[in-house]
Image (tube, rainbow, N blue to C red):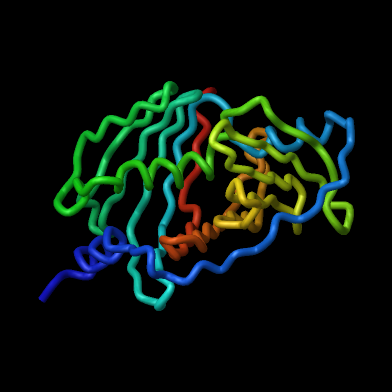
Amino acid sequence: MKSPVCVFFILLLCLTACAAERQRAMPEMTATQDEAVGEECVAIFPRGRWQFIHAIDFSLGDGSGSTVIGLTSLDGDGFGCALLTIEGFTLFEAVCRGDGAVEVRRAVSPFDKPGFAEGLMRDVRMIFLAPATDNVRYGWLAGHVPVCRFTGADGLITDIMPAVAGCWRINTFTPALAGNRSLIGRSCRKIDDIPIPAYLELKDSGQADYTLKLTLLTAENLNR
């Protein structure tokens, strides 16, 4: 019988393009020249050296999934991450440097499959790092919700809403303006002026069709 951890990662690595894509249109934005909105958006991301530990519940569109422990270490523009079993066995470890290069240091089979490291780095980057582009506009969405709209060189659009229900939210859209990913932070508390969510939910509603639910266990500012 396969272990729950093995089943979890087999499911993760076998995500297919046949999953239904629940698209949502990019909302209209009323532009503003108020750069204070931009400062609020950047302020949601930890700066410098931090370490986070989360319990991560993963589920596919059909409801199946499992739980692992995620450890993330930030160091300026670069970061490292590891996935461990509840018992502490390291399943995967990698670092992503400031130039975007990924170095896999440990990958227990089947974690050495093509695309796994890149996908995981993409999730970590969305959670902890501001979009790497200077192409940004500031504005308001319906309900007077402040938003920063970043457009990457690849056409991917990222909306950062720094003030939603006492925390923050991030949505991404394809170049065709269809929503494909969302990240919701809840129960934020300030740690050295950074709003750190006690709970995060990342949904990929594109081809992958999965959900990550992250419950914060520890957050440590290593800049002190």
Q: Is residue 217 above or below residue 11?
A: above
Can you tell which quarter of the image residue 193 is in? top right
Q: Residue furthest left?
A: 1
Q: Residue 98: x and y, percent?
A: 44, 22
Q: Is residue 108 left or right of residue 162?
A: left
Question: What residue is shown at x 57% (from left), y 31% (from top)?
Answer: 153
Q: Describe residue 110's horizontal placement relative to residue 179 as left or right.
A: left
Residue 75 picture quarter: top left
Q: How many marks?
A: 0
Image-based side of 135 in relation to 7, left or right? right
Looking at the rendering, which quadrant does residue 58 occupy? Answer: bottom left
Residue 174: x and y, percent? 58, 49
**Which quarter of the rendering shows the C terminus?**
top right
Dividing the image into 4 quarters, which one contains the N terminus? bottom left
Q: Position of residue 95 (x, y in %)?
A: 33, 32
Going 74% across and 39% down the picture, which residue do you hit? 148
Q: Position of residue 84 (x, y in %)?
A: 27, 51
Residue at image point 44% right, 64% down: 210
Q: Residue at x 19, y 44 (%)?
A: 107
Q: Is residue 66 left or right of residue 124?
A: left
Of residues 119 and 91, the one nearer the viewer is: 119
Q: Is residue 54 above or below residue 41?
A: below
